[in-house]
Amino acid sequence: MVQQVVVIGGGAAGMSAASAARRADPACDVTVLEATGHAAYGVCGIPYYLAGLVDRADDLVAYPASYFRERRRIDLRLHTRALALDPERRVVHCRELERGVRLRYDRLVVAAGGAAVLPPLPGLDDDRVVTVRTLEDAIALRSLLDAGRIARALVVGAGYVGLEMAEALHARRVAVTAVEAMPAVMPTLDEPIAALVADEVRRHGVDLRLGARFNGVTRDEDQLLALVDGEALPVDVVVLAIGVRPSADVAAACGARTGPGGALLVDEEMRTSLEHVYAAGDCIAPQHLVLGRPAFVPLGPAGNKTGRVAGTVAAGGRARFRGVVGTAVVKVFDLGVARTGLTLAQAQDEFGPDVIATDIVGRSRAKYYPGAESVTVRLVHEPGGRLFGAQMVSTADVAKRIDVVAAALQAGFDVDDVLALDLSYAPPYAPVYEPLLLAAQAAATHSSRVAV
Amino acid sequence: MVQQVVVIGGGAAGMSAASAARRADPACDVTVLEATGHAAYGVCGIPYYLAGLVDRADDLVAYPASYFRERRRIDLRLHTRALALDPERRVVHCRELERGVRLRYDRLVVAAGGAAVLPPLPGLDDDRVVTVRTLEDAIALRSLLDAGRIARALVVGAGYVGLEMAEALHARRVAVTAVEAMPAVMPTLDEPIAALVADEVRRHGVDLRLGARFNGVTRDEDQLLALVDGEALPVDVVVLAIGVRPSADVAAACGARTGPGGALLVDEEMRTSLEHVYAAGDCIAPQHLVLGRPAFVPLGPAGNKTGRVAGTVAAGGRARFRGVVGTAVVKVFDLGVARTGLTLAQAQDEFGPDVIATDIVGRSRAKYYPGAESVTVRLVHEPGGRLFGAQMVSTADVAKRIDVVAAALQAGFDVDDVLALDLSYAPPYAPVYEPLLLAAQAAATHSSRVAV
C-alpha cells in the first residue's frame, strides 16, 4: 500500500506528478515540497511577462496553490526546500521556512527541475546580476523594468533563453548587448541556420557579439560594468543565460545513477536507481529516440509528461514515457526557429561522416496568395536514406511544420517516407509542395537547394 | 526506346507529368494536349481570384506556356481536346482548334482531370448557370463581378468548393444563398464537426439551407429564378458545386479498368490496365492507405505527385506513388477546417461499430499568451487502439496540425503512439499540451471531452 507520496519540486513536472498520483490513488497522501513561493507556473512564459505581453505574474500560474490544496487534496508546501534524502529509511530532510522538517515517504518523486548555470567569475553576487529561472527572479526584474531603471542590459549566452531575454528587454526599449562564447547562436542548430537567427537578432538592433568572452562584472561607484573581451560595458543589469543544469543533487548524493550533464537516469516508468524513488522533469535525462540513449534536453512537454508518468506509477498506476526526439521551437523577434532530432554535427558524430544535410527554401502558402513567406528547411539524413533531424526558420509557422518531422522521427522514417506524406493543401495555408516535401524530394534525389 | 510521350491534360498533373518525362529523358518528344486555352494553373486558387485577393488570372498560372515550350521543350497544345484513343495502334485522336489530328505515342499519360458534376435539371444551359473548374469559367465570372452585375447568387452544393465559392462571392458583397441536399455541409466531415462549419457560414450572413433541394432554373423575362424546395429565388448567377467526377472517358471507353466513382485504376507506378497508358491526377483513384484500397479523392498534392510519377515512369525513369491518407484543409471564412483519414461514419462502415470518436477542445497557444484560440479536435480510433482519422476546426492553424496526424496514419500509429509524440512547445505557438496530445490522451484513456 502506498500511503505517502512525496514530490520534491512544485514546477510543471512536480505538480503533474502530484496530480497524477492523486488521480491514480484517491486515498494516498500527496505532499509537494517547493523551494520558492510559487508553484505550477510556466517558466517558458517569463520572457513574455517581462516584455509586458503578459500582464501579471499570476497569469503564468496554471492553478493557484489553493486549487491544488482544496480541489486536489495535495499538501503543497511552499518555501520548503529538500536538503537531503535517506533512501534506507525513506525520509526527506527539508527546511520549511526556517524550520527543519523530516518527511517519511513510501514513494518519492524527484522533480526539482533545473538551475541556471553560474560561471565562476568575479562580481556575480551583485544584485543587478540576475538569472530568470524562477517567478521570483522574473518579478524582481520586471519591477526594475516597470520602474524605468533599466536602460542598458547585457545578456550572457545566446541559447534560446538568452535570445528570448534579449527580445523581451528590447521590447521594453532597453539597449541590449548579447554575448556568446561560441561562434554561433543556439548550439541546437547547425551553423548556417543559426546564422539566419543571428541576422534576425542584429536586424532588430541587438548588439550581438559571437565568440566573445564575458569575464564578470565590477562597479565604478554606482555604475555596474560588465566585462566583455576586456571592455567594460556600463549596464543596468546583467542577465545570465548560459545554460541549465539538472537539480539532481539530493538524489545523486545518495548514489542515484546519473547520466548526461549529471541528470538522473530513469527507466520508462521514471524509476531512478534508488528504490521507491522516481524522477521527472528537467532533472532527468530521458531516452532520446534518435540517439538511442539518454540525453539531457530540459523542455516543457517532456517535463509535464514525465511528471504525469512518475506520479501515476509512484501511486501504483500504470504509465510509461518512451522518450524524446528533441523537438523545440522558439520565437526570435519575427522568426520562428524550430528543430527536432539531431543536427548535422550531432548526427555525423553519432552515425558517421556519410550523414548529410539538405537545405531548401520553400514558401508558406501558394505563391499567389497574399502573405506567402519563405520557409527555410534543413533535413539531416543519410544520402537518400534515414532521417535524423530537421531545422526550420521562417516568419511563417514552423512550430507545427517541425511537428510533422517529430512524428516522422518517432516512426523511423526515411526521406522517401517523408516525401510520400499526404500533407494538407489549400492556398491560404500551404503551397501544393509543402516546404518539407520539397526538402524530402531534394534529399531523396541528392539535389540540394531546389529552386521553387 | 521511348520517343513520343503524349500527355492528355495540361493541368497540374499533366504538366507535372510532362516536366517529369522531360527530366527523365532529355531526348524524347513530349506533347501535351490541353482542351482549354490555359495550362498549369492552380484550380484551387480560383476562389481567391474571384474574391479579388488575387489580382489577375495569370497569377494562378505556375509558368506561362512559353516557359514549357522554350525552357522545357514541351509541345504544349492549347485548345486541343483528346477525343478517342486507339491503344492497339497507340494513337490519340484529337481536335486542335477546328482541326482533327491523329497523334502517335509510345507512352500516353491520361491526366484529364475532373469535371463538375452536372445534375439533369431544367435550365442549366442558361449562361448565368456556371461551374468553376477552369480558368475560363473563373475569368467569365470575375468579369461579371467586376462589372457589378451580380448582387444575388445561389451556390448549389456545400462541399469545400461550394463553401469557398460562397465565401468568395460574399467577399464581393454578393448576397449568397447556399443549398445542400444533405443534412450537413462537407460530407468529408462527421456531423458534429460539420455543424461548427455551418455555424461559421451562417454567422457571416450566408443563407445556408441544408437538406434543401435545388430543382433547376427558369427565367421570368430577364430575371433568372433558381428553384429551391419549390421556391423561386431571384438570383443573378447560379454556381454549381455539387461535386467532381473523373474525366476518365477517353481511356475507359477503350476498356481501361476503373474503380470508385469511375476513376482510372493504376498501380504504384501509375500504369493503367491498358498497355503503355499511364494516368495521374483527378481522373485516377489512388490507393487509400487507411482503407487499403483505391479511393477517389481528387486533390492537388496527389495530382502533382502522381503526375510526376506517371511522367517519370512513362519516359523510362523510376518512381512510385504509395497512396493517400485523405488529408485536406479548407478555409471557411475565419475557420480552418482540416481532416485526414476516415470519418467516424467511414471507419465504422469499414472496420466495424467498435470504432469511436474522441472530441476535445484545446488551445492554440499557452493560455496566457495573447491570441490563444480554441482548437476542436476529433480523433477517430479503436478504443485505446488504432488511429483511423482526425478532424480539426479552429480560427488558429489546423493545416499543419492535421499534417502531424497524416504522418501518424502513414506510420500506422495507435493513439498511444500519438500521445508519445514529442511535439514542439513555445508559448507563442503552442500550449504545453498540444490539442492533438490532449485528444490522444483522452482517446487513450476513453475519457472524451477533457476539460482544459
Image (spheres, coloured by chain):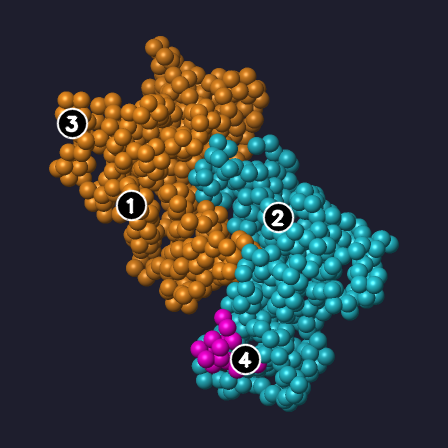
Chain colours: A cyan, B orange
x, y percentage for residue B18?
49, 25
User: Label 1 lies in what chain?
Assistant: B
Mark 3 neighbour class, 10 Å CA radius: few under 14, some 14 to 19, many 20 or more: some
Front label number (2 vs 4) = 2
Q: What kind of residue is marked 2?
A: Phe
Front label number (3 vs 1) = 1
Q: Are marks 4 and 1 on the same chain?
A: no
Q: How far is disc 2 from disc 3 in space, using C-alphas?
A: 58 Å
Q: What kind of residue is marked 1?
A: Arg
On screen, residue B306 above or below A266: above
Dot label at residue A323: none
User: Label 2 lies in what chain?
Assistant: A
Q: Name the residue under label 3.
A: B218
Q: What kind of residue is marked 4?
A: Leu
Q: Which of A407 and B110 is in front in this view?
A: A407
Q: What kind of residue is marked 3?
A: Thr
Q: How far is disc 4 from disc 1 in space, using C-alphas?
A: 49 Å
How many marks on residues? 4
Q: Mark 1 points at which residue?
A: B202
Identify the magenta region: A63-77
On screen, residue A256 above or below A374: below
Which residue in the rendered view is the most extreme toward the top?
B99
Q: Nearer the viewer, residue B317 or A175?
A: A175
